[in-house]
Image: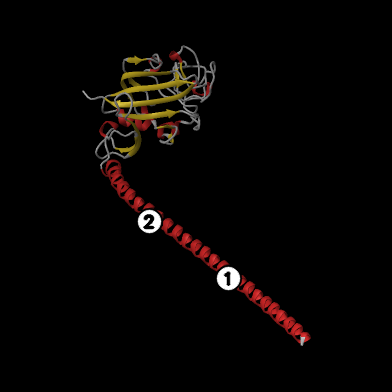
Amino acid sequence: MQEMKVSLKKRVETSELNTCTKLEDLKNQFISKMDCMQLQQNIEKKTYQETTQTELNKLREHKKSLDMLIDSVRNMSSLTEKGKKILETQFIHPVRSCRQVTKLSRKYLIHIEQDSKLFEVLCEQNNFGGGWTVIQHRFDGSVDFYRNWTKYRNGFGNLEGEFWLGLEYVHQITKNRPHELLVEIKDFYGNYGYAKYDGFELDSESEEYELKKLGTYSGTAGDSMKLHKYQKFSTFDRDNDAHADSSCAKKYRGAWWYRKCYDANLNGRYQNTTGDGSAIVWYHFKNDFRGLSFLRIMIRDIIN
């Protein structure tokens, strides 16, 4: 009897142990499943958040692009109005001189007479009261000014950079109305000066573009044009200077209204020198042959 009790007790204990073990396994499986479900939930949540954030970012980019497009349309409308005014000024209603244009320094289309040929000029409106037509501009040496007669007659370079407008254009501008002349210079040390003349006119090509009229000087650069008054223009292929033995244009690598030879050599070489006569020189600025780093020649019609 006692043995049966002991055996039964062992069976019960074994059964309880097995049951507990199974329950523990089930518990662990359940916990593991719950962890998997939670992990899956987290992954799905993260993926959803990332997807949502990506879509939001795309929407923000679309909004930004739309805003930029709206701004561009507005700017285009504004530019269209400005462009219309420029076109009206430059092409629909060309002017006779830079005195008649708006207060903007830029290119304009002009005609000397009502039925004359149209051509572009650069107008300077900021200095010395504005209304100036730029006929020469040098500031970086990017354009070679050692050119022949035809080039100096017709002009060369670019109005947005260095250029020579052309002797024929200057003759046409100055022949029927009184003009004044302004020369601005600066050396490589930063010293600035200007020379202003209250009269200026070029004769025709048949007269070799003679410096027919040069008025009274005023300014800070010294008078280096007086020597050249009534002289004909010379280039290396057309020698009109007063020097019997040689060509000033060839000797000094320029083109100008040379006499024997010059006080001004504004179409010389662009170089930083102090004693080379072939440089861009305005002798009476410092009474030497220093090269100039900046040069601008302008004319303006005189209003009585």
Q: Identify the residue position indicated by label 1 in the image.
A: 34
Position in image of residue 223 (x %, y %): 39, 14
Judged from this view, the residue extending furthest toward the left is 304
- Residue at the spot x=32%, y=50% of the render? 74
Is residue 5 visible in the rendered image? The answer is yes
Going by the numbered disc 1, the residue's amino acid type is: Met
- Res. 242 image quadrant: top left
Q: Position of residue 92 (x, y in %)?
A: 27, 44
Q: CA distance from mark 1 to mark 2?
A: 47 Å
Q: Nearer the viewer, residue 234 or 200?
A: 200
Find residue 66 and name its label: 2
In terms of depth relative to the viewer, which is nearer, 18 or 275? Answer: 18
Residue at screen point 59% across, 68% down: 35
* Mark earlier in primary sequence (1, 2): 1
Query: Can you name the residue that lies furthest to the top here?
Result: 287
SS category of the residue bearing label 1 = helix
- 157 versus 196 height, above or below: below
Tell me where residue 271 appears, x and y as whole percent: 53, 24
Q: Is residue 289 left or right of residue 27?
A: left
Classify residue 45 as left or right of residue 154: right
Q: Is residue 168 above or below residue 88?
A: above
Residue at position x 53%, y 16% in the image = 274
Specify the quadrant of the image occupied by residue 153.
Answer: top left
Residue 34 found in image quarter: bottom right
Mark sitting on residue 222: none
- Residue 86: horizontal and vertical position, in percent? 30, 42
**Residue placed most toward the observer, 259 or 194:** 194
Horizontally, residue 95 falls left or right of residue 162, namely left
